[in-house]
Amino acid sequence: MPTQHRAIQSRQALIRSAAQSFIDKGVSASGMVDISRRARLSKGALYFHFESKEELTLAVRDEALGALRELEDQLLRAPDPVLSASREFTVALLDRVDRDVVVRAGLQIRPETDPEPSGARLHRRWCALFQEKAAADRATGRLPLDTDPQRLARALTTMVVGLLELGHADRTWWSREAVTDMWRQLVPAGRAVPAGAGRTLRPGAPAGPRTGAVPQPALRGAAVRDPAAFTPRRTPPR
């Protein structure tokens, strides 16, 4: 095995070992010797790659953020509307967190030299990405003109972060079924935006509803209920 390839494998093994130790014990209680033993590498090999535990902690965080950056790029490039794209982003995100110990640890740890937890920056970035995509959808008619991209982005971010946090105690929250069910509650079946629903009106043109148009209260932050669940109000006999 070439020396460079072996060095890369050793470094990755140490990062994964540290991530697992950070999850099991916490950063402060994790020792460098124990981390090297978990990776089945010598202490000398550990210090060849990382001079301190802080440097190793930063490596775990950066590895996790790098993996998530790929998912964020896919979100922006996705041809689907923001609601569908954000759902698939969340499915991919939670699946990666569930399978990858480095990503799971990187979202929770806070290096001593970092003034802010990694998660807080990520949440702001996700909100900005959702808002950017929602604004683009509104401009191209994929969302109604009265949709507020910022409010929609905040709602989507709240859902993503909520599922992420809930999954640390119960991983069933990270399943595709849990994610799709949450999105189904946000946008029930049959409330997708019809083609051209958000088209720009000509000056002076009436703003009334088009024939066959479907109302979009869910996208404006209003609570949505299944029409079948509504019970007609009966006027009591006099």
Image: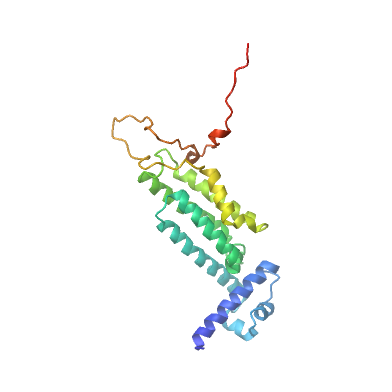
Which one is in front, 110 or 11?
Answer: 11
Report x, y in % for residue 31. Answer: 69, 75
Q: Residue 232, how many percent across, how many down? A: 57, 25
Q: Nearer the viewer, residue 197 or 149?
A: 197
- On screen, 46 above or below 105? below
Q: Residue drawn at (45%, 35%), measured in percent from left and top?
A: 215
Find residue 23 and report its image quarter. bottom right
Q: Is residue 128 visible?
A: no
The residue under the point 57% across, 48% down is 182
Q: Is residue 213 left or right of residue 17?
A: left
Up the image or down, 63 lies above or below 159; here it is: below
Q: Nearer the viewer, residue 154 or 92?
A: 92
In percent of width and height, residue 39 lies at: 63, 79
Q: Is residue 25 above or below residue 92?
A: below
Which residue: 64% across, 85% down?
42
**Where's the C terminus, which quadrant?**
top right
